[in-house]
Image (spheres, grey):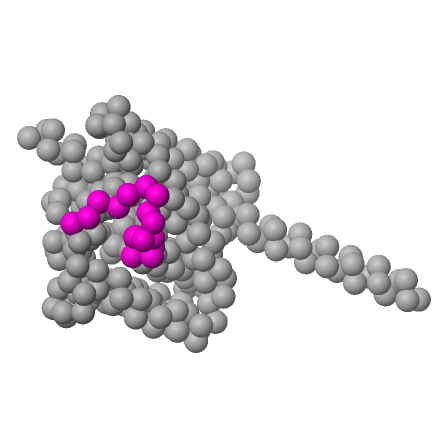
Amino acid sequence: MLNIFFESFNQAIRRFEYDYVFIDGVFLAIWLGFLIKYKKWAPIKFGIITGFLIYTIDAIAWFNIPAGSNYPSGTFIREYWIGGIYMPRPLGDFFWIKAGADFMMTFSYSLYAFTWLWIIFENFIKKNTKEIALFTALFIGFWMLTPFLSLLLPINNTIVESVRYMDSQLVIWFINIAVGYSLLFLIYGTNKFGRKKPKIILYVFFIGCVEAFFMEFPLLVSGIRPTGVLYLLFSTVIMFNQGAPYLYILYDVVIPRLSRKVKKDQLKEIESVILRKK
């Protein structure tokens, strides 16, 4: 039983119909429409940048990196079967069909997850509960509707199966969490940087858990993630909290400092142009 328990963590499986990709695309367009309407340019940029990063890691790197000695030779971290056909390397004629599924699981994921996260961080400071409620409702609603509409609508019922063998990554996950929350504690749990606000640490952890739950629960109840409640709990606590502390530090410390530096440089340039004209 313990072997099955740990295997479910090591092997992140998804099984869905290909029309999930199209339905997700429609809802993503609506999501982006709301972001544009509310002028959420910084969250959109953040989502696009992280989207490229996650696509590169998941769809390219993991698809081509061997899973390790625990698996038969020729097994890679990310494996795909579409319509019962194992996705070869190189992909050849299967490039675009795989790219569609990859886009949904990486780029679309990022444009939801990281834009929502930015909005929550931003409105936690501004205390704008209306925006928090609006974007949270859209996020949950779209992610809950998509898998069930995919099952109901006969658009393209080709089965996509993907598995991610994470044995070699679990240690990295725990190191990421330990380092991330250590940095967060150093900045917000001590007076070293003049930012002592211990509640920020709990807030970031809570938001990381909430976000992971929003994304994993629909997969579990729709049968796309054929694991169980224990995997849901594991993912809720671990999955997004690998990155949540770093993202908050980036949002609250790094980006504001870079913005101030850019503005100072721009002002200096303007001043130098004015002086030259004189």
Q: How many marks?
A: 0
Q: Is residue 170 above or below residue 242?
A: above
Q: Quadrant of residue 183?
A: top left
Span highlighted in magenta in the image: 84-99
Question: Is residue 188 shown left or right of residue 95?
Answer: right
Which x, y percent locates residue 82? Answer: 21, 52
Residue 93 place in picture, x, y as percent: 31, 53
Image vertical order of residue 249 relative to residue 171, above or below: below
Looking at the image, the residue that sits furthest to the bottom is 37
Q: Is residue 92 magenta?
A: yes
Residue at left offset 25%, top offset 36%:
165
Q: Nearer the viewer, residue 269 or 8?
A: 8
Residue at horizontal 79 percent and vertical 63 percent from the top: 270
Is residue 200 in sight in this rendering? no
Horizontal and vertical percent position of residue 191:
52, 38
Q: Which quarter shows the C terminus?
A: bottom right
Q: Position of residue 246 (x, y in %)?
A: 44, 43
**Taking 204 as reference, is 227 left or right?**
left
Residue 126 visible in the shown view? yes
Residue for point 72% across, 59% down: 266
Q: Residue 272 appears in which quarter of the rendering? A: bottom right
